[in-house]
Image (spheres, coloured by chain):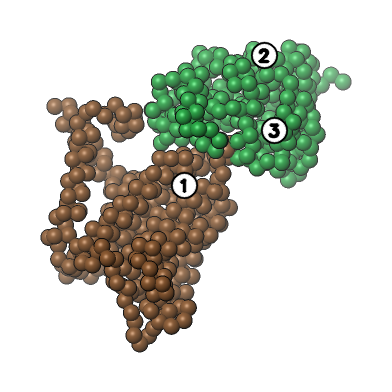
Amino acid sequence: MIEIRDLSVSFGGVRALDGLSARLDDPIVGVIGPNGAGKTTLLNAFSGFVPVASGSLTAFGTDLLAMAPHRRARWGLRRSFQTEEMVDDLTVADNVRVMLDALTMKPREKTAAVERALAFVGLADQGRLLCAGMDLYRRRQVEIAKIVAGSPKVVLLDEPAAGLQPNEAAALRDILVAIPETCGARVVLIDHDVDLIAAICRSTLVLDFGRRLAFGPTGEVLRDPKVKAAYLGLKEAA
Amino acid sequence: MSALEARQQSAAGTDGTGTLRLIRLAGLVATAALVFGIVPEVLGSLWLKVLISAAIYGLAASGVALLYARLGLVSLMQVALVGVGGWVTLKMWHATGLPFEIDMLAGGLAAAIVGALLGLPALRMRGLYFALVTLMAAAAFQIFITATQFPNGGEGWLGVSRSAPAFMPRPLLATTDAAMFRYVVAVAVLCFLAIEACRRSRAGRAWALIRKSEASAMAAGVSVAFYKLAAFALAGFVAGVAGGLLAATIGVLDARSFPAADSVMLFALTLVGGAYAFLGQAITGLLFRAVPALLNDVGVDGDIAFLIFGAALLHALITAPTGIAGQLFGLFGRLIRLGGRR
C-alpha cells in the first residue's frame, strides 16, 4: 500500500507537483498524463532526487521521505529510468549483483538471488556476458532483473518499453505483469502507451500540470472526458 | 567489433581451455623472470635507480588511473600525496625507529586520509572545477614543503636539521640497488593486486554505477559519498606508499622534487600510458622517469621529453583513449587471432 498525501515539488516558480494525493492499493498502478504533467517528477520524489516542498510519501507504513536516496533503495524501493542505465563494462550478473551489495545477505544467497532474477527475465544463461554491445531489449531485460533481485517492496517503472519494437514490447509486458506475484512488490508504471496501461494496470492515476486529474479503475479513468480532453488537447466541456 | 568479441569471450571464460590462457601465463612468467631475475642483474646502478624511480611513479600513477578510469575524475595532486607519504614515512622513522614497512604503511595511511579529505569537494564538484581544486592542493603542498622541508633527523616537530642531516636506511630486505628494485616492484605489484581486488568486488561495481550516473547508483542503494571517498583514500594510499619507497631509496627527500607541475605531468602520462590496465601505469612510470634519463644519456636535454609527452598526450586524447597499453593489447589480440586463423 502506497500513500501519496498532499505532495508538492517546485522548481523555481514551476509547481511540478501540486498537492497530489492518491492511495495506490493495486498490484500494478499506471501513471499517465501529457508531457510535463509531473510523472517523472513523482518518481524522482519517491527516489529522493528532487526536494519535496510539502506533503508525505509512505509505503507499507514506512515514511520514505525521511530516508536518504540510497537508504530508500536498500529498504526496497526499486526503479528504472527512461534511458536504460546498464554499465557496459560489467557483466550482466554484476549489473544485477550491485543491487544486492548493500543488503545483508549471505554471498551464496546473493548469487542465488541474481540467478533467480536473471531466470525471471529470461537471461538465465547469460550472466557472464558483458553488457557492452547488447541490444536495447536485452538491456531492458537486465534492468527488470535488477529491479526484482533481492526483496523489492515498491517498484517504479519509467517507460520501460520505450524504444522497443512492438514484438519486444509485448514480450516485456509479459515480464512486467509477473513482477507483483514473483516478488510481492507493488508496481507503479509510467507509460505513454495507453494500450499497455489498459492491459496490465488495474487502476490508473492521471496527472496534468502536477495535479491529479483522475484516479480509479483503469477502464473508467480512460473513458473520463476530462482525461480525453487533456490527452487530445481539447477544451474541457464546462 | 572484434575487440568487443574478444572481451565478451574472455568475460564468458570461453577461452579458458584454449591457447590464449597458456600464452597469457607464459607472458606473465616471462615478464616476472625478466623483471625479477634478469633486469636487476644486468643493469648498472644508475639505470637501476632510474627503474626504481619509474616503478615508484608507476605505482603512484595507478592511483590517478583508478580515479580516472573508474570514476572519471581528474586528480592533479598525486605527486603532492607522494610527498605527504614520504614526509610521514621519514618522520615516523626518525621519531620511532620502527621497521621501514610500518613507517611506509603509516605514510600510506596518512596520504589516504589527506587524499580523502581533499576528495570531499568531489562530492559536489566534477570535471574542470574538481581538477582545479586538486591542482591548488598540489600547489599548496609545494609551498608548504618548500617552507618546511622533509624530516631528516633534526630537532623539533618538523625534524629538519640543516647541519647534520641523517639518512633513513633502506629496508632490511633491500640494501642493494638490485634488491631495492625487486622490493619496489613487489610492493607495487601488491598494491596493483589490492586495487584489482577492489575493482572486482562490491567497490568496483559501485564505482561503475557512479561513473554511469549517480542517480542510478543511488537507486541501486550505493552510497555515492562513501565509495567516492574510498577511491580517493585508495589512490592516496598508493601515493603514500610510493612516497615511502622513494624516501627509502635515497634515504632523504628533496622538497624540490614535488612541484605541482609534476602532478599534472603524471596525470597526462597516465592517459598516455593507459589508465585502464596496469601495464599502462608501468609505461607511465617509464615515460615519467626513464625517458628523460634516456635522453640525457644520449646527450640530449631531458627537457625535450616534454615535447615528446605533449605530442603523445595529443595522440592519446585524439586516437588512443586507452593509451599505449590499450594499443598494445589491441595489437596482441590481433596477432592471436591471426595465429588462430592459420
Q: CA distance from mark 2 to mark 3?
A: 20 Å
Vertical position of residue B45 compared to residue B203: above or below: below
Residue A128 visible in the picture: yes
Of badges 1 and 2, nearer the viewer stands 1
Q: Amino acid at mark 1?
A: Leu
> Which chain is home to disc 2?
A
Crowding at dot 2, Cα within 10 Å, few <14 / some 14-19 / many 20+, comes out as: some
Q: Secondary structure at mark 1?
A: helix
Quadrant holding the C terminus of chain B? top left
Q: Earlier in the sequence, mark 2 or mark 3?
A: 3
The colour one sees for chain A in the rendered image is: green
Crowding near pointer 1: few (<14 within 10 Å), some, many (20+)?
many
Residue at (62, 31) in percent of width and height: A76
User: Which residue is tagged 3?
Assistant: A42
Relative to B300, say whether A53 is above or below. above
The structure residue drawn at horizontal position 68% and vertical position 34%, both measured from the top left corner, is: A46
Chain name for mark 3: A
Q: Which mark is residue B71?
A: 1
Choose top left, top right, bottom left or bottom right for residue B328.
top left
Q: Quadrant of the N terminus of chain B?
A: top left
- The verdict on a common chain for dots 2 and 3 is yes
Q: Which residue is mark 2?
A: A198
Q: Nearer the viewer, mark 3 or mark 1?
A: 1
> Is label 3 in contact with label 1 (beta carbons under 8 Å)?
no
On whether disc 1 and disc 2 are found on a single subunit, the reply is no
